[in-house]
Amino acid sequence: MKFPSLPLLLSFNGGYVDTLGFLALSGLFTAHVTGNFVTFGSTVALGTAGALPKLLALPVFCLVVFLTRLSGLCLQRRNLPVVKPLLFAKFVLLSAVAAYALYHGPFVASENLVMCVVGMTLVSAMAIQNAVHRAHLPKAPPSTLMTGTTTQIMLDLADLLAGVKGEQTEAAAARIKRMIVAVVAFAVGCGLGALGFILAPAGAFVLPAVVAAVGLFRNPEGSEA
């Protein structure tokens, strides 16, 4: 049995962390951060908890992506490894959340400061993952947002059904296989994130750190650094 590649581990964690964060942190999207525009509007309209983390998610995400890119460029200029040090920073953030969750126990909506700090830590971890994936794993499908990936799968299937010939056929078939596997990994992550929240609301935060740790020992296939 072939061990999952780094992109698949990232896709799994993307689905898991986003689902767990949404369930445990009053509807906060920690990976699909633009979705927080919708949930923020819902929070304001319904008067529910968690408005501040939803409002901060996008600027925090943008800032961390920016800083991650700068850090990567600095490492490149010094001819140092890039992908693993950045993924290690993500691992540290996920581990910090896991340790605090085990110590603190399940998060409740009334703990505004705790929810905000934990939420922004997870957003920062997913921002690093997104930045590394986009900059250094260009051949792999996105690991935190599957809308574009699903659209591309359907476009390629339509091309194959229409009888597109030549190199385009081979490219489309290979792309479909790669993207379907990514979508499945993301979906499995979503499912296990929900199951983890049901069975162990605090302990469920440990798995993303474990998966991130495993990812540190995988070769960054398709990496540019």
Image (cartoon, rainbow, N blue to C red):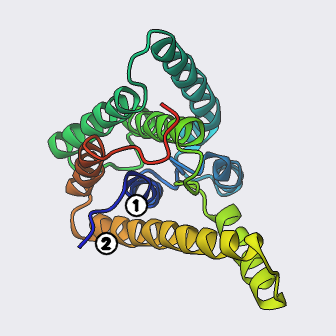
Q: Looking at the image, which residue is at 52% across and 35% down? A: 224
Looking at the image, residue 190 sits to the left or right of residue 175; the answer is left
Q: Looking at the image, which residue is at 67% across and 74% down? A: 170
**Label 2 crowd bin: few (<14), some (14–19), many (20+), radius 10 Å:** some
Of the residues shown, which amino acid type is indicated by label 2? Answer: Leu
**Residue wearing tag 2:** 195
Of the residues shown, which amino acid type is indicated by label 1? Answer: Phe
Quarter holding residue 96: top left
* Residue 34 location (% of width, % of height): 67, 47
**Residue wearing tag 1:** 12
* Residue 152 location (% of width, % of height): 72, 69
Q: Looking at the image, which residue is at 65% across and 65% down? A: 149
* Residue 128 location (% of width, % of height): 48, 34
Specify the quadrant that holds the N terminus: bottom left
Looking at the image, residue 171 sits to the left or right of residue 162; the answer is left
155, 44: nearer the viewer: 155
